[in-house]
Amino acid sequence: MAILLFLLFSRTIATVSAFIATTPAKSDSFTPPDNYLIDCGSSSQTTLPDRRIFSSDSASSQYLQYHGREIAVVDLSADVPLPIYKSAKVFNCEATYSFRVTKTGWHWVRLHFFPIGNNEFKLQETKFTVVAMDTLVLLHKHSPNGLEMQEYLMNVTSERLNLRFCGKKDSPAFVNAIEVVSAPDMVITDSSSALFPVGKKIEGMTKYSYQKMYRLNVGGVTIGPGNDTLGRTWNSDEKFLKPPSAAKNISITPNVVTYLEGGSPLIAPPTVYASAMVMGTSNTIAPNFNVTWQFDLDKSFPYLIRLHFCDIVSKALNELYFNVYIGGKIAVSALDLSSITNGLSVAYYHDVFVEPPMISNPFFVQVGPLNAPMGTKNAILNGLEILRINNSVNSLDGEFGADGRSATGPGRGTVAAVGFAMMFGAFAGLGAMAVKWQKRPQDWQKKNSFSSWLLPLHAGDASFLASSKRTSLGSKKSAFYASTQGLGRYLSFAELQDATKNWDSNSVIGIGGFGNVYLGVLEDGTKVAVKRGNPQSEQGINEFQTELQMLSKLRHRHLVSLIGYCDENSEMILVYEFMEHGPLRDHLYGKNLPTVSWKQRLEICIGAARGLHYLHTGSATAIIHRDVKTTNILLDENFTAKMADFGLSKDVGMGEAHVSTAVKGSFGYLDPEYFRKQQLTDKSDVYSFGVVLLEVLCARSAIDPTLPREQVNLAEWAMQWKRKGLLDKIIDPNLVGKINPESMNKYAEAAEKCLAEYGVDRPTMGDVLWNLEYALQLQDQGKPEEGGGSGGSGGGSALANAAPLAPAIDNRPVMTPAQASQNPAEVQAIEDHSGTAMFAQYGNLNGR
Ligand SMILES: *[C@@H]1O[C@H](CO)[C@@H](O)[C@H](O)[C@H]1NC(C)=O
Ligand SMILES: *[C@@H]1O[C@H](CO)[C@@H](O)[C@H](O)[C@H]1NC(C)=O
Ligand SMILES: *[C@@H]1O[C@H](CO)[C@@H](O)[C@H](O)[C@H]1NC(C)=O
Ligand SMILES: *[C@@H]1O[C@H](CO)[C@@H](O)[C@H](O)[C@H]1NC(C)=O
Ligand SMILES: *[C@@H]1O[C@H](CO)[C@@H](O)[C@H](O)[C@H]1NC(C)=O
Ligand SMILES: *[C@@H]1O[C@H](CO)[C@@H](O)[C@H](O)[C@H]1NC(C)=O
């Protein structure tokens, strides 16, 4: 009954969708200019049940060029599905069928074989080769050991199409029937998309020749040549489903299927699109599995995989998003049929070009639900074609070309030939042929009961669904939008793939523990930094979630902002505004970038301090960054500083007592008190910021193990000089003589306070900000001028900003460690924690 209801519903939708650039499946018929149907060895013409008439191939055949003894074998009592298999022509030397081509272009060539029993020849054992157009090997030493029909599609460019049967005395060739029929140009378009790199556009598909391996009417019954727009056979997919219980067939009446403008029933008839397989338990608790079809393929050929889709399962647009996998690799990520077809029950197909390294045997085509909080959890496939493409020596069978060349290269002929002979036996048994009358096993439904194989798969996703209790479409959508509030937009994996040139290694601008950071360009031209998590990294998952949570509530001029995210297919991808000038550190040392002036450095420090001040005081709960360092301060095109990388950040609400105290951060920046007491407060950030101030002043790293022992730790070393009043002796040589001494003093004072042994003695970020603003004024004017507000980085007086906000921090209770017993040895040095390495290749970037 559910299906009935659904049927009615989808029909109404389809009617509506017909207004949107689609055309109903009207009689888009094609009359082939060339249409040769030959019943070889028969003395009279033969009419098939589908009313096609095969003409006789008598001794004086106008098509056959043959100089041997003509032999026809006939067995009128043969148990064959079609009368054309009751007779065959046998050739014990080379014979050529030659057909005049009235219109060049695509032609089907179908060869029918059935080794008829007779007294003279053992047709079951003979092996022979068939070559088309003198160069294209269709069959190589092939032995049809049962009834088979081989179908080819070739672009004929000459006025004759020759089919050469290479028979020998001891190994004759035979054929029962031949079809040579024109196909419309549209059957193969010149471009296709590659399986790897995913989606890469492949041109030149019209130069290849094809052999049909599989053509399936998924979820439906076999469609015979008489019911196909181009005389093709579409087999039922049942026997390829692994396991069959993962899928459920659905169907609508074919006449509601519409085609996109430019689409045509010639690609596949409406009956193919009107049936489909969807996920077997899509409407139960938490379906999370693929619907899988399994095939046998020869690994040495490229293939064209044509996927036919038609959304006959959704009740409304934009409900269905799913993934398509080919050979275990993602082929289409988050396929959104609605956005392509603008309607339901609209036919759509997608071609994927798969090269030999991606072919496995067995070979799988899978559709599965999108692991994202949108749409319904389901996936669909309506039709599937797998076409073999000729190899480099223009063969569709085996490695040898018509001229004897081997596809695996010269000099390997004999070895390869032996290998081939062995492989050959296997190939014959592959069942790659259309055996359309084969009965499906009666017990297929009994095998693989649901519960036995589905349960473990459910487990992984249960928590998600339980938490968002999605019962109807409306609540599903609202759950989705609510969860994404503040997270910028949801970017599809495909979109990000485009933006990063399919994760091109040349787009990598940083490598870190979390994964890689890529420079991406969105469709609208916006440059973004795309941080793609490495799913293997446990640390990565936690930090991804933390960062997402943090950024979702933060928005500030001095915090790097999140543009969007993607968590499709268990991916963890965060997309940020692109910071043109990369990390502050690169402008201080190690990268030979132009020197940054003292004033500019002050402005950068002020910007970063503002960002931190906002983190500490700007929202209801204080946020401790926990990883303040020069690589986490990024600079945009105008050198505006922004704090980045909130992966370690801690949210420490006033009322909350539980703060994980595992000491995390980067060596050289780590607050010694936090390290000792494992008590995390905002003053830990202040300490780290003090180290940053010294780094900016001295242009050296916080920890430099190559230096003499007493100099390794910048904070300790610089404070010794500060206490001696000689800090100016160790500053960046580029700054010598360029800093106003008063500015220098104020700055050094601020740094020293930040580095105080005890947190209580350290200033708040608000105080630090005030001091830096002051230092900037001193630099600008040579004398202090309070409230001048000349700071280049944000206008407005720091005094005014800082004063009212600061007390909020000072009164904050010190956090109680949740696990005070935690061993300090557990310090996680994360020197390379994203930031450092994040823009490591930033220098290269400029060079490109
Ligand atoms: C057949 O191949 C020729 C030569 O490669 C090409 O120009 C032509 O467009 C192809 N025909 C079709 C119908 O694709
Ligand atoms: C075509 O389809 C009709 C209806 O499904 C069926 O009765 C008929 O046998 C089919 N004809 C062929 C040639 O497959
Ligand atoms: C599913 O397939 C079975 C067997 O082929 C058929 O009897 C049934 O009608 C199909 N269901 C739908 C909804 O098409
Ligand atoms: C679906 O298949 C792909 C490729 O084989 C695999 O990576 C993915 O994990 C599968 N998805 C599920 C939910 O099993
Ligand atoms: C198929 O044969 C054509 C013509 O010889 C050739 O141009 C093409 O490269 C071959 N295909 C492949 C995949 O090598
Ligand atoms: C940089 O400054 C220019 C000029 O003031 C402004 O147009 C541009 O938007 C700024 N860029 C950023 C990223 O803020």
Image: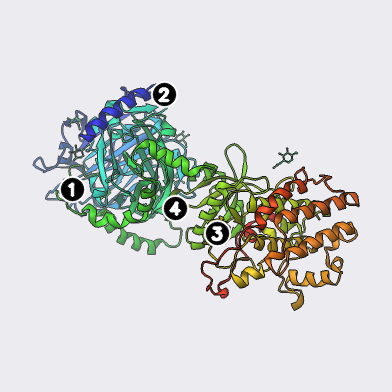
**Pointer 2: residues within 10 angstroms few (<14), some, or many (20+)?**
few
Location of residue 276 by image quarter:
top left
Residue at mark 4: C-beta within 8 A of ligand 4: yes
Q: Which residue type carries mark 2?
A: Ile
Q: Which residue is mark 1?
A: 115
Q: Which residue is mark 3?
A: 514
State the SS at label 2: loop
From this view, report whether residue 62 is shown above or below residue 207.
above
Q: Earlier in the sequence, mark 4 or mark 2?
A: 2
The Cα–Cα distance between marks 4 and 1, rounded to whole angstroms, is 52 Å
Q: Earlier in the sequence, mark 4 or mark 3?
A: 3
The Cα–Cα distance between marks 4 and 2, rounded to whole angstroms, is 34 Å
The Cα–Cα distance between marks 3 and 1, rounded to whole angstroms, is 62 Å
The Cα–Cα distance between marks 4 and 3, rounded to whole angstroms, is 14 Å
The Cα–Cα distance between marks 3 and 2, rounded to whole angstroms, is 45 Å
Q: Which residue is mark 2?
A: 20
Q: Earlier in the sequence, mark 4 or mark 1?
A: 1
Foreground mark, 3 or 2, reads 3
Q: Determine contact: label 2, label 1, CB under 8 Å.
A: no
**Pointer 3: residues within 10 angstroms few (<14), some, or many (20+)?**
many
State the SS at label 1: loop
Location of residue 161 by image quarter:
top left
Q: Residue at x 82, y 69 (%)?
A: 722
Q: Nearer the viewer, residue 785 or 560?
A: 785
